[in-house]
Image: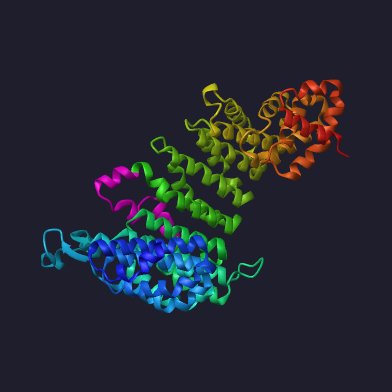
Amino acid sequence: MIMMLAISPSIRSKKADEDLKLRARATECMGCVAVAVGKDIFRPCLNQVFALADENLTLDYFSLSEATFRLYTSLAQCLGEEFCKVLPKVHQYAVKCLESMDGVEIRHQGGDMSAFHQEDVHDEDDMLRQMQYSIRSGAVDEKAAAIQSMQSFAEFCGRGYLPFIKPTLDICKEMLEYPHEFVRHGVAAVLHEMIKLAHKTFPNPQNSNKMQKSAMAIVMATLPHILEMINVETDKQCCAEAVDAVKTSIESFGVSILETAGKPLLENLETMMKEKAPCQTYHDEEQDAKDETDHDEVLIDHVTDLLSTIAKATGPRFEPLFVRFIPHLLKFNAPNRSAPDRLMAVGTIGDIADHMKGSIKKYLPKLFPFIIKALADSEPEVRRNAAYTVGILVVHGGETAAPFYKASIESLKKLQHIPAESKDNEFFHACADNATSAIGKIMQQKKEILTQPQVISWFMGGLPLKNDQEEAKTVYSVMATLLRQHTAIMKDHMAHALFVCGRVFATEGVRDNIKQGLIPVAKSLSGALGSNAGAAVQGLSAEEKDRLLKVLKSK
């Protein structure tokens, strides 16, 4: 019905606004149908659909042109590389749309352009602040759809899009300062897609950070535009997309990107960490008030994710950058900062420390007090990240971390207690799991602590894990070590340990190799407990008991 409505001569002959709006809706719906039914079923309609699309763009109607570019986006997704047959034509349609100034009027705040006095303008930014843009919403939507279609072409046409990279980058360069952020966000997404295309088409050789020449050419042509956008962009979402593009390039191609981007990237990163980038300062009062609550979600999280990605790519060599960026990171844990800010700061320190490994040791005297303080934060998510970070610092800190073990354990044990009113709150359970794991990591590092009865009681009291099964490898390894090497001390905990094994065997989130490692532990415990084994597992469900029984009977 939609197809017949869109391509029927009766509706195509009518040019009134209401008819064109109906035609626009039918055009966009055709794209949705194509994606839904797939190319094999939709292929017989393609010639008529492309003819309709060509005609749509001659009618000079914003919403109809917008719908046509959305149709092209859907058809690229539906057809994949088969869409390359029409790429020369439709890509040019998109370029022509983006180059058009239809619907845009530029004027001075006090009147027309003649009101400008160049001698009173201190710089280009000052001139921009004196200008106002009047943009018809239809023109913005049309251009946004056109630039989004380019992203779709690059994503689904793969290698077939390579001949169009240069004209795509040329138009992106022109559109970097387009007056409306909807269009600029599309530009950032296209630039990001160019990086993905380079990786998909010319990936690094296996186990190598050396880029292929073709990939290097694409990235070298794209990165300057991305860095320029980060440097000048006044909208946070656009800037965040550009930051993500840099992150993708490093994840895809490794440290060679850092050598390519170099100083400009690090300077932009530091400016954003200082919250001094144009998109963090160039707002009206209403936007500033809004940003007090949302800026960390819109931009800073992306920036710190990029920082962690750089740390992962460089490992211990990240140390000079750690020295440079840690003061900016620590400020986000100030009492006046929002909970998401504090959450981000603590978690990022943990991630970076994990990648730096032993090179983090010399900074522990500064970091541990900060993290231990965060263990008492008012927000459970922050406390969870702090517990995770304590575990990381302990693992990589060695003896340098030893002076902080006692204070850490004292704070961590408090996180294992979950108030009755929060027993259904997953963040409290995740926090308790991370605290138990951190205590376990301290026990692994220090034999004297491993055998302390009180510490063992706190550790065993946190088992089994209820939420964060990523910590299973650590905690159940420690439990097995205690049972194997310190049987006398663990005598009072054997019944609970068998209960823990029964729960773990039935927990889907625990990896199979960890469960396999606990099988001999469970059998040994069952033998040691004898007739008391039944009482030990009374708290298990019927399903968990059956699973445990099968394990105990297995050979």
Main SS category, magenta section? helix
Of residues 329 and 99, which is closer to you in this image?
Answer: 99
Q: Which residue corresponds to the image point at 38% horizontal and 58% vertical from the top-left?
A: 238
Numbered disc total: 0
Residue 260 visible in the shown view: no
Residue 276 percent location from the top left of the image: 35, 52
Residue 280 percent location from the top left of the image: 34, 51
Quarter of the image with the C terminus is top right
Residue 173 visible in the shown view: yes
Colouring? rainbow
Of residues 517 and 359, which is closer to you in this image?
Answer: 517
Residue 244 percent location from the top left of the image: 47, 58
Q: Does 532 sit above or below residue 177?
A: above
Per the rendered image, the range of residues in magenta is: 266-291
Q: Is residue 513 left or right of residue 193?
A: right
Q: Is residue 481 left or right of residue 46?
A: right
Q: Is residue 229 left or right of residue 511?
A: left
Within the magenta stretch, is there residue 443? Answer: no
Q: Which residue corresponds to the image point at 76% horizontal and 29% vertical from the top-left?
A: 545
Q: Does 474 sit above or below residue 108?
A: above
Quarter of the image with the N terminus is bottom left
In which image quadrant can residue 505 be found? top right
Within the magenta stretch, is there residue 290? Answer: yes
In which image quadrant can residue 363 be found? top right
Residue 317 percent location from the top left of the image: 58, 57
Q: Which residue corresponds to the image point at 14% horizontal and 63% vertical from the top-left?
A: 120
Of residues 494 and 119, which is closer to you in this image?
Answer: 494
